[in-house]
Amino acid sequence: MNKGKKVFVGMSGGVDSSLSAALLKEQGYDVTGVFIKVWQPDFIECTWKNDRLDAMRVASELEIPFVTLDLEKEYKQGVIDYMLSEYKEGRTPNPDVMCNREVKFGAFWKWAKEQGADFIATGHYAKTDHEELLVSDDKNKDQTYFLWMLTKNDLEHILFPIGHLKKDDVRNEAKNRGLYTSGKKDSQGLCFVGTIDIKTLLKEYIEEKIGDVKNEDGEVIGVHDGVTFYTIGERHGFTIRKKTTDDAPYYVIRKNIKNNELIVSHQKPEKKLHEEILLDRVNWVNGGPRDGFTYEARARYRALLANVTIAKKNDTWHASVISGDLVATPGQSLVFYDKEKCLGGGIIVY
């Protein structure tokens, strides 16, 4: 049934996308490997050329066509500019979510469709079924948290070939096929750009500004280098000068953008039971939540799931915590689940 169906596979030079291309070819698809070249800051070591070479080697091993697609402009505007704008406003964005929406499943699909593609595929740990987005079989690697902006229409032309495999199985399957990338370490950090520390990137575009760290009583107990560089729940990167006999860590619980102040506490900033979370840019993958039902949600990748209810009030979506811990950081994604199904999500306002 797959014979003649044309699929473009986003090949990053890693083992996940390499095996994805191999599996699709074995299933009878007409496979083309595509390395997506994106914008990278000129002050970090260039890594994309090595990654592209690895992807090219695998394409050669599989005897499939290979193309380099330049999406620098789309990535800079849709991901980097968005990220910088959010940080300047005091929010903590999730650039990987926007990378998936704007680049991997936006501009990439638009280009592939123009080339006559029936599908695009990536090495994400996720599954689809009847235009629904499902968690992968490897719960530790599941990446649906970053895919909540996909729609039913998107899923009609997206393939996730390794969503049914565990990470160890992916490496073993790649090794069994003799793929060049079978032993390559997983990439970490910002989508495509790699292991650069986010604060290092931000400080190239946002000026440092020394400010006060205050406790909940308003007492100045330390300093920081700019309120925009911190996120709610963070416990590192600022200096506590007023030491106490209590060595418990301090967590950022609020940010005063106007006065450039961090407010910290020994208490983690979890949302209290029945406390509401206001959401923006909400997307439901395939149908919204049902009234009166309890769902699961997480506000960080791999964070423990909390139980929530979801309601729409005055054209605005709200989530209310029923049980579990949930740190709601403005700018981050709150993603909802109904058992194995990823319902969708939204960006946290407060």
Image: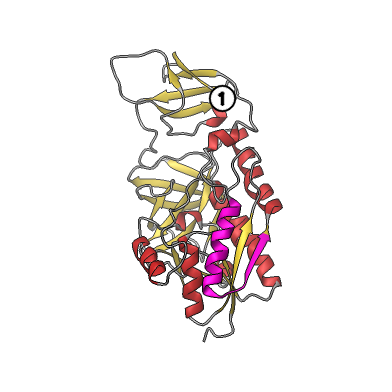
Q: Nearer the viewer, residue 181 or 20?
A: 181
Kindly identify the residue that appears in the image at 43 percent across and 69 percent down.
178
As shown in the figure, which amino acid type bears the numbered disc 1? Gly
The residue where tag 1 is placed is 226
Where is residue 120 drawn, in percent x and y? 58, 69
- Mainly helix, strand or loop, the magenta region? helix
Is 53 within the magenta?
yes
* Side of 245 where 103 appears, left or right: right
Secondary structure under the numbered disc 1 in the rendered image: loop
Up-down relation of residue 102 to residue 58 (above or below): above
Kindly identify the residue that appears in the image at 44 percent across and 53 percent down.
186
Up-down relation of residue 144 to residue 47 (above or below): below
Kindly identify the residue that appears in the image at 52 percent across and 51 percent down.
346
* Side of 105 where 350 appears, left or right: left
Up-down relation of residue 329 to residue 304 (above or below): above
Up-down relation of residue 43 to residue 2 (above or below): above
Q: Nearer the viewer, residue 198 or 252?
A: 198
- Can you name the residue that lies furthest to the left here? 245
Magenta stretch in the rendered image = 48-69
- Disc 1 residue crowd, few under 14, some 14–19, many 20+, Cα 10 Å: many
Q: Nearer the viewer, residue 308 or 36?
A: 36
Where is residue 259 drawn, in percent x and y? 58, 20
